[in-house]
Amino acid sequence: MAAPPDPKEELLSLASPGSQWFWDRGEGEEEAVTPKGAKPEPQAGEPGPGLGSGAREAAPRELGSGPARPPPVAMETASTAIDLLYWRDIKQTGIVFGSFLLLLFSLTQFSVVSVVAYLALAALSATISFRIYKSVLQAVQKTDEGHPFKAYLELEITLSQEQIQKYTDCLQFYVNNTLKELRRLFLVQDLVDSLKFAVLMWLLTYVGALFNGLTLLLMAVVSMFTLPVVYVKHQAQIDQYLGLVRTHINAVVAKIQAKIPGAKRHTE
């Protein structure tokens, strides 16, 4: 029995640009096959005959030759998110999950200004009370331990130019790819993908009529921290049902492609 795929590798592959969040291929579409006996052409960024591994690494990637790799900070962020969502560290995940739930429940009852003000007051009450307590204790015991938060006050919390550039590159990477994908969908580069996007937006109109934004966000957070664990425990059954659903959807998409002129994708 084959080992289940690593969820971390799956998320990292989805984080790369050019990965379709639609179904990749409908029924009736075939992949390009190299004729028997013919030598495959070298891909962009790969060396030709006679080039070694060093040349492969040094070969520049041509413009438009393929999707670029995500920045290292994006890979690290995806890895950290996987560890949180799969409860690798129960204590850390519990703190993050509980903080999100507390914040979202607070926003459902109070305004954003009130929530920020109450959180600031709670933090200040805790730190001021602890500072006064330590000062009184030092006065009674006649000790000179100094400021109770001295270690935290001396921590370096400023962002360096390299860190700012790194996160800026990561943000630019995802913004650019999001804009390209939206342009592709709204300008109908692929009719099938644009129709799927239109159906999704139509369904979201009904979802928006039933739930407000905070309720949807709360449901999304709960799902993010529960569904991955459920999937790991019942992966075989879930994959079986998802395969049946995907097969049925591909059959429907194939029928639509056959009836709509120009909807059938060209074989790449």
Image (spheres, rainbow, N blue to C red):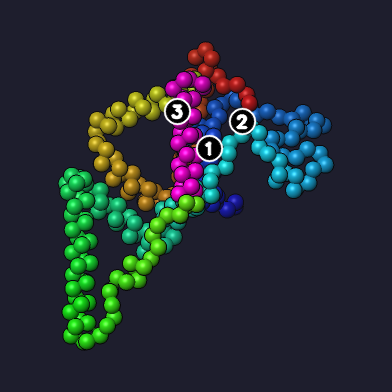
Give the residue pinned by disc 2.
64
Crowding at dot 2, Cα within 10 Å, few <14 / some 14-19 / many 20+, comes out as few
Position of residue 244 in the picture relative to residue 141 (left or right)? right
Of the two numbered discs 2 and 3 in the rendering, the one whose residue sits closer to the viewer: 2
Q: Give the amino acid at mark 2.
A: Gly
Position of residue 37 in the picture relative to residue 33 (left or right)? right
Magenta-drawn stretch contains 182: yes
Q: Give the amino acid at mark 3.
A: Leu
Whether residue 125 is visible, yes or no, is: yes
Q: Residue at x 45, y 30 (%)?
A: 179
Foreground residue among 174 and 239: 174
For the residues marked 3 and 1, what is the alpha-carbon distance in whole angstroms? 13 Å
Magenta-drawn stretch contains 86: no
The image quarter in which residue 70 lies: top right
Quadrant location of the C terminus in the rendered image: top right
Figure check: 135 above or below 181? below
Q: Secondary structure at mark 3?
A: helix
Crowding at dot 3, Cα within 10 Å, few <14 / some 14-19 / many 20+, comes out as some
Give the residue pinned by disc 3.
182
Position of residue 220 in the picture relative to residue 165 (left or right)? left
N-term-proximal mark, 1 vs 2? 1
Q: Residue at x 37, y 51 (%)?
A: 225
Crowding at dot 1, Cα within 10 Å, few <14 / some 14-19 / many 20+, comes out as some
Q: Residue at x 54, y 14 (%)?
A: 262
Q: Which residues are magenta?
A: 164-190
Residue 194 in percent (x, y) is at: 45, 23
